[in-house]
Image (tube, helix red, strand yellow):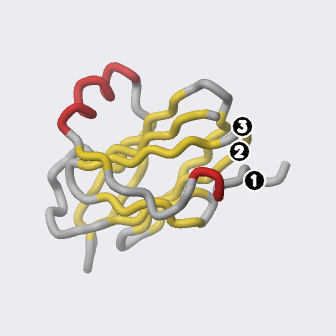
Amino acid sequence: MGGVYVLRDSSRGQTSVLEISVNGLPIAKTAPKTFTQVNLKKGRYYIGGRGENYTQIELNIDSGKKYFIRQVVTTGWNDFRNEFQIMELGEVENSIADLRLVRKIARDSDLKPMPE
């Protein structure tokens, strides 16, 4: 299993809750200064974020590795928009201690890799 962390480490969009999904299955909702974590089997996955827009990033998960994604929130026309950035370990160590873990709405065992 590989660990995937999605961090929303800014306080932008105080009233906005954005959905995180794995291969289209919603797994959590982030708010400012929160993060979610999921353990995934080895394989290819699409991590998605939905606000006013939909963004996604493709990850090839290897067992025993950790992957860190920053969810960047910007102002849109009617709601907040989001995009993903891969984070370096040094960036994560500086910000994750100030964040709150949000409850997942899907079990890790429900998440399967994309077919080859």
Name the mark nearer the viewer: 2 or 3: 3
What residue do we see at 47% from left, 66% from top? Answer: 54
Query: Where is the N terminus found, in terms of image quarters?
Result: top right
For the residues bearing labels 3 and 1, Cβ distance under 8 angstroms: no
Q: CA distance from mark 2 to mark 3?
A: 7 Å
Amino acid type, mark 1: Met
Residue assigned mark 1: 114
Residue 3, percent across and down? Answer: 53, 35
Residue 87, percent across and down? Answer: 40, 32
For the residues bearing labels 2 and 1, Cβ distance under 8 angstroms: yes
Q: Which mark is residue 44?
A: 2
Q: Which mark is residue 42?
A: 3
Is 63 left or right of 38, judged from the image as shown? right
Q: CA distance from mark 3 to mark 1?
A: 10 Å
Residue 112, percent across and down? Answer: 71, 53
Name the mark nearer the viewer: 3 or 1: 3
Crowd class of label 1 (few under 14; some 14 to 19; many from 20; radius 10 Å): few
Where disc 1 sits, the SS reads loop
Which residue sits furthest top?
A: 90
Decide: is 87 above or below 46: above
Where disc 2 sits, the SS reads strand
